[in-house]
Image (cartoon, rainbow, N blue to C red):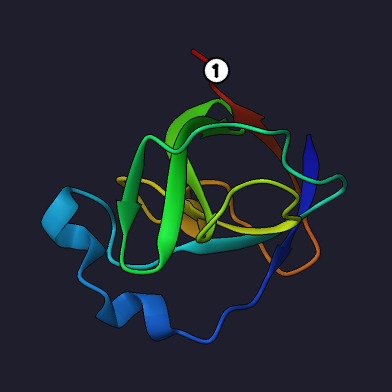
Amino acid sequence: MLGKVRSGSGIDRNRKWDSLGFYPGTLNVLLDMRLPPTTADFYRFEFACVKGKLNGIDCYVCADKELTDKRLVFILAEWKLRDIFNLEDDDYVNVEIKRG
């Protein structure tokens, strides 16, 4: 799926994602289509997350509570993805969901 990078509120920096081994911020992405039905790999706070890839890098794709029928997602990874890919708002990224 293609998605566009969006600015976030900065709230996720305070959620302690780093305690799970992730970079302490997230990358917000507006997908060009809704997430396909899938089962979450884990839940944290009020979010459901599933394994995926962003531009070929392993990550988790997360959305509010249920993952079904969502377009606005945020990406968790070990690194700051904006820096790795030199991303700015409205840049396109490729998001993959790993199934099974």
| Residue type at numbered disc 1 | Arg
Which residue appears farthest toward the right when viewing the image?
Answer: 32
The picture places residue 93, in percent across and down from the top left corner, at 72, 44
Identify the image quadrant of the N terminus.
top right
The picture places residue 68, in percent across and down from the top left corner, at 67, 46
Along the horizontal axis of the image, is 93 left or right of 34?
left
The picture places residue 94, in percent across and down from the top left corner, at 71, 36
Along the horizontal axis of the image, is 81 left or right of 93?
left
Along the horizontal axis of the image, is 92 left or right of 49?
right
**Residue ID for mark 1:** 99
The picture places residue 9, in percent across and down from the top left corner, at 53, 87
Residue 96 placement: quadrant? top right
Q: Residue at x 73, y 34 (%)?
A: 36
Which residue appears farthest toward the top when viewing the image?
Answer: 100
Asked if residue 88 is positioned above or below residue 93 in the image, the reply reads below
* 10 Å crowding of disc 1: few (<14), some (14-19), many (20+): few
SS of the residue at dot 1? loop
Observer-nearest of 26 and 45: 45
Observer-nearest of 22 and 40: 40
Q: Residue at x 51, y 31 (%)?
A: 52
Along the horizontal axis of the image, is 14 left or right of 56?
left
